[in-house]
Image (cartoon, rainbow, N blue to C red):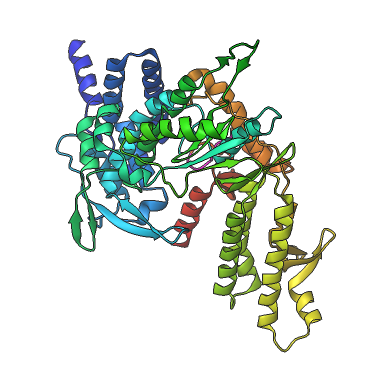
Amino acid sequence: MEKQQRSEAQAKCASSAERKTVWKGIDFARCERRVRKLQVRIAKAQKEGRYNKVTALQHLLVTSFEAKGLAVRKVTSNKGKRTAGADHVLWDTDAKKINAVSSLKRRGYKALPLKRVNIPKKNGKMRPLGIPTMKDRAMQALYLMALEPIAETTADANSYGFRKFRSAADAMDALHRWLSKDCSPQWILEGDIKGCFDHISHEWLMKNIPMDKSILQKWLKCGYVYNRELFPTEEGTPQGGIISPTLANMTLDGLQNLLETHFPWERVSGKSGWYCPKVRLVRYADDFIITGDTKEILEHSVKPLVADFLAERGLTLSEEKTKITHITDGFDFLGFNVRKFGDTLLTQPSKDRTKRMLSKVKDEIKRFRGDAQHELIMRLNPILNGWANYYKHSAASNVFRKTDYQIYKKLWRWALRRHGNKCKGWIKNRYFHRIDGRDWVFAVKRKNEKHEEYFIPITILFNTKIERYPQLKCDVNPFDPEWKQYLEKRRTAKMKMSLKGKRSLISMWERQNRNCVLCGQPITAETSWHTMSQQKNGRNHLCLVHDGCYQSVTHKKKK
């Protein structure tokens, strides 16, 4: 009996390559469940202050085959799967992927230098990106699984960037609720950290980040290659690394508690009442907003306190972007303009973001000026849909209407340029049609299988329904079982909101248990999805799948 138990234990501890020799044979749904259980235990131990237990569970997770398989799948299925690092190695076959799983070991691991790539910023400057190798990315994804439950447990309640089930819409909703009342603060500190990712102190990270210090040091000190020359890294975390956003968030966590401690409710001397300085924080990555009752509090008390907090971490405030503004003058945050007109607070798309979107549309029209109308519509609609969905929870109707007119003028010039010898009436009848009571809609005619005509129109921004965004409870922790039911209800509500008016899609989604039929992972409002015909019992049935899964299947069929 003991011999049998020993053999079973040895089988469980067998190497990854021995346990799974075929990549497609890995049950990723089981892997997800296994890793999820360990992450829940890590979050519970962290909450209870059992830090030795946290370390033990982290080690158990990063050495498990299930976590290694998920890490490899993550780096081989995202947008960067075709981008190699400094070693020019890609994991583009099943054999390479299964070998990669067995190679993710702590012993003998050495991080290779990053490949430096500069991308332009909107202010004309360049943003340096450090692209790790495939193995380094997988190792970062592996250790991120063990670090993320701790980060979510200790994070600031009003931090929204690069966190699960949080987005810019949640940050803007919280900001709108705080500033829209009659008793709301009137002064705003717009904060921006100068080169946040590039200047975080390595010493502070090594002392305060609860993960394997040896592995962390190798990532921080790996250096980067630029123009075939090796440069050392003495500070900062690489922009482009999978774990870097979480490290940056953990670096800035604690600012909210610091402000709440220094600016509590105070008893007013000589009067019967209390006074609140109304100092509150909303942070998205390295951009943050701090409200205050007076300009003096923000300038003389809050700003020096924030500067000292950042100095401990090797960071400084950007003087050109950090400013104090009155709410009636308005300010820009996350692409929105927030301004109060009398007693009414309006959150609208910023002028800068609107101009950038129109410039992008203009470039697409110019680039594809020789293509067919259908191709141009297919190019423009994803841009317009994404922009409209981002701002549909704000007071954007008037901006949508004006932007539609600007796009119409560009499309009209595109049509005139194609037919210089035709009259305007002929051009109008060819490219613009009357659809649902609206005239001058840029659309193309098509015929279905029954030879019935239908239109494929360009997206009309003004048709986007303005909806109230569902409020998020700030203390929610995705790794705490207590919040599971709340997150499920919120995920379902957001998905039904995105599918509003599409009963067939909602029933299809419910029939699939809200999961993709190809990969088995949940389909949510945050994940892009696609409809696909699937044969079952000799019949074709429509089903909902992830956009990435759909593309992978169609790509295989083309081959």
Magenta part, dominant SS = loop
Residue 437 appears in the rendering: yes
Q: Where residue 243 appears, x then y in whole percent?
A: 34, 39
Q: Quadrant of residue 128?
A: bottom left
- In the displayed image of the protein, which residue is found farthest to the front? 270
Residue 92 appears in the rendering: no
- In the displayed image of the protein, which residue is found farthest to the bottom? 421
Q: Quadrant of residue 26?
A: top left
Q: Quadrant of residue 459?
A: bottom right
Q: Is residue 74 above or below residue 50?
A: below
- In the displayed image of the protein, which residue is found farthest to the left? 108
Q: Is residue 517 rendered magenta in the image?
A: yes
In the shown orientation, is residue 552 left or right of residue 197?
A: right
Q: Where residue 82 appears, x then y in whole percent?
A: 36, 56
Number of marks? 0
Q: Is residue 26 above or below residue 320?
A: above
| Highlighted range, magenta | 514-519
Q: Is residue 544 above or below residue 36?
A: below
The residue that appears at 34% across and 29% down in the rendered structure is 147
- Name the image quarter holding the C terminus: bottom left
Q: Is residue 522 rendered magenta in the image?
A: no
- Name the image quarter holding the N terminus: top left
Q: Where residue 331 appears, x then y in whole percent?
A: 59, 45
Q: Where residue 95 appears, x then y in whole percent?
A: 28, 48
In the shown orientation, is residue 501 left or right of residue 418?
A: right
The residue that appears at 30% across and 17% down in the rendered structure is 51
In the shown orientation, is residue 430 left or right of residue 510?
A: right
The residue that appears at 63% across and 45% down in the rendered structure is 330
